[in-house]
Amino acid sequence: MYRRPLLQALPRLGRLALAAAGLATMAWMPAQAQGNYPSRTITMVVPFAAGGPTDTVARLVAESMSRDLNQTVVVENVGGAGGTLGAARVAQARPDGYTVLMHHIGMATTPTLYRRLSYDPVGGFAPIGLVTEVPMTVITRKDIPAKDLKELAALIRKETTGINYANAGIGAASHLCGLLLQKAVDAPMTTVPYRGTGPAMTDLISGTVDMMCDQTTNTTEQIRAGAVKVFAVTTAERLAAMPDVPTAAEAGLPGLEVTIWHGLYAPKGTDTAIVNRLSAALQKALQDPKVGQRFADLGTTPVASDRATPAAHAAFWQNDIAKWKPVIEAAGQYAD
Ligand code: MLT
């Protein structure tokens, strides 16, 4: 049986009164929501597998943010397709501050690399703040027959189809570093994609794959333990966390320089007050001595507070998109 919608069934004056009350309620609701925010668990999506570098950064930051927000911040790993599955999950989530994304430099390369996505890789997000800058390391299984980067480059050139290279999918940091490495060595390598470099590291340690270029947050401890062999860091200067390891330039491959950054995002449309609240908690987490110490142990540094703001993050992100666009277009390699 057809029922008239409730609003139509009411007399006109009643409808007006109800509409006015509704508007008043709506105007009051966001303020109320922000005042109570956060009133339940926040999910921080990591678009890569557990145990990898993005996961490590996210867990450290989430734990510290939880204390300031007085609510649990749980990390959820949604890996696959170079980070685009996890990013889609957040872009399409309710913009209520309860789902956020911890992502890396892939946020700057995806808009050019992926021409067919189910979400808007730029307009779908509200930046909250930059988090950290992380150097990368060129590492191999520990029994690779090369004692320095020049010998490794020669081995890659000699066995072009033999040496394989693990990465976390197109647009992942390990993929970008791999592209620079192949360019510097001037030889192609067979790539083996993973949902993140956490599981890739397990296979590198067991010798299932030959090499990888990955963030120090994932490699420092394995290098120190002798579980993998390190050849170079991808920064202009050597790192305090591994002073004996040469820079790629010192080791003979000057073109191999890249630093990874992480940022925190909410879905577009999230209330500004909520974004600012999350940014304040992020800034506090980055000043947390426990977080700073752990980052230093892993060869990375949290960004200064003035970069962990929505405005600084937005400007840096746009710049990086513009920086990578011509590089990707020149390479002509797309994810589709
Ligand atoms: C990458 O290569 O982009 C990262 O290592 C991904 C990850 O966090 O696993």
Image (cartoon, grey):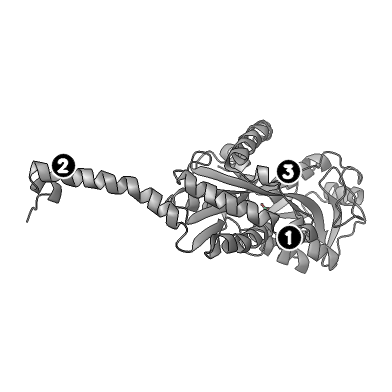
Separation of marks 3 and 1 at Cα, in angstroms? 35 Å
Residue 133, horizontal then vertical, whole percent: 72, 48
Identify the residue under disc 1.
289
- Mark sitting earlier along the chain (3/1): 3
Q: In the visual, does 29 lie left or right of 208?
A: left
Classify mark 1: helix, strand or loop.
helix
- Mark sitting earlier along the chain (2/3): 2
Q: In the visual, does 332 lie left or right of 180?
A: left
Cβ–Cβ under 8 Å for marks 2 and 1: no
Quarter of the image where the N terminus is located? bottom left
Q: In the visual, does 88 lie left or right of 251?
A: left
Residue 259, horizontal then vertical, whole percent: 75, 45
Cβ–Cβ under 8 Å for marks 3 and 1: no
In front: 89, or 305?
Answer: 305
Residue 202, horizontal then vertical, whole percent: 72, 67
Which callout, 2 or 3, points to the residue nearer the camera? 2
- Mark sitting earlier along the chain (2/1): 2
Q: In the visual, does 252 lie left or right of 193?
A: right
Residue type of the residue flagged with mark 3: Leu
Residue type of the residue flagged with mark 2: Leu
Q: Residues within 10 Å of mark 2 (few under 14, many from 20)?
A: few
In front: 326, or 262?
Answer: 262
Identify the residue under disc 2.
16
**Res. 17 in view:** yes
Residue 310, horizontal then vertical, whole percent: 58, 42
Which callout, 3 or 1, points to the residue nearer the camera? 1
In front: 177, or 62?
Answer: 62
Identify the residue under disc 3.
179
